[in-house]
Image (tube, rainbow, N blue to C red):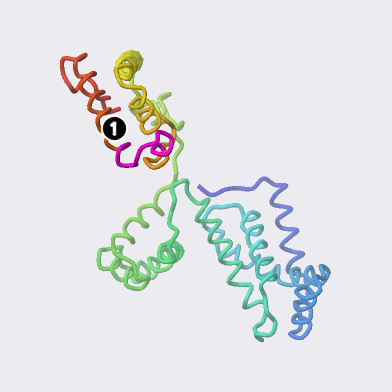
Amino acid sequence: MAHIDDPTTQRANLAYIKNAMREPLLERDHEFDLARRWRDEGNEQALHELVRAYARLVVATATRFRNYGLPMGDLIQEGNVGLMQAAARFEPEREVRFSTYAAWWIRSAMQDYILRNWSIVRTGTTAAQKSLFFNLRRLRAKIEGKGEGMTDVGRQWIADQLRVGRSDVTEMEMRLSGADQSLNAPIRETSEDEWQDFLPDARPNPEDIVIGLRDAETRSKWLAEALGELSPRERTIIQQRRLGDEAVTLEELGHELGVSKERVRQLEQRALLKLKNSMLKKVERPSDLLLEDA
């Protein structure tokens, strides 16, 4: 759905556009002089003059992208960000006009904004996906202009033109043909039911939560009793190797206990076997010790 600005915003956008189009174009030498003064001296007045002169590029580019349903003012704002980035990176020594250099930055900034905001579903981040997003309508119009509908042959032609897979073309075509829909929207005009009312709740019910808490408490009690059956050294190893937030290394425990790293590993394995045997005595089935999948 296209975004419609309120009258106040529309008037502000129109005033900006008129002012931008009134700014005089710069001569080549003067343009390079402004760029050098900004880069070498940090002269903000030179920057402002340079940017104002090419605000018309921002307006022209925003007009090209107005059919994506996003606010014109936001497109212009993003384009101005790209224009400032161009001014910060421009090198007049390369003998390239600033308008040519800035056009890429302006277009890139607007395209990134459109991809971020056109849909709540992420549209694509690779260069090929961006190219597909911004060129699919144009290439599809060429096919339909010849009186042909979109067929697999046409999709393959577009895929070849943009160097992507035909499945990518089909997927992007589906995305562009539909808009995001609120879960709070009614399923029918005459119904009070909303789409979200029919979404399944995957969370456990209260009974399962209570049972899970009780089982966890029981298992904790069994573990405490099993730990009590270990020797002090074995209990220290298990607590620091298995029950802490960060496991202590075998080498560190060896220094603390005055034994070798290999001896710590042997004691750990023996302690784990004792714990397992102790807890198996408390249940009828070994599977009772395992947590069920959520």
Residue at the front extreme, as displayed: 258
Q: Is residue 96 above or below residue 183?
A: below
Q: Is residue 207 shown to the viewer in this render?
A: no
> Mark 1: which secondary structure?
helix
Judging by the rendered image, the residue that carries numbered circle 1 is 267
Q: Residue 263 in magenta?
A: yes
Q: Residue 162 in magenta?
A: no
Looking at the image, which is closer to me, 41 or 5? 41
Q: Residue at x 34, y 67 (%)?
A: 164
User: What percent of the width, then of the height, locates residue 134?
Assistant: 46, 64
Q: Amino acid at mark 1?
A: Leu
In the rendered view of the protein, which quadrant contains the C terminus?
top left
User: What percent of the width, then of the height, locates residue 212?
Assistant: 32, 17
Q: Residue at x 39, y 42 (%)?
A: 251
Looking at the image, which is closer to me, 32 or 53? 32
> In the rendered view, does 154 fall on the left or right side of 108?
left
Q: Is residue 118 above or below residue 218?
A: below
Q: Quadrant of residue 56?
A: bottom right
Q: Quadrant of residue 143?
A: bottom left
Looking at the image, which is closer to me, 276 or 228? 228
Looking at the image, which is closer to me, 258 or 187? 258
User: What percent of the width, then of the height, locates residue 210?
Assistant: 35, 13
Magenta highlight range: 253-264
Magenta span: chief secondary structure:
helix
> In the rendered view, does 50 fall on the left or right side of 61?
right
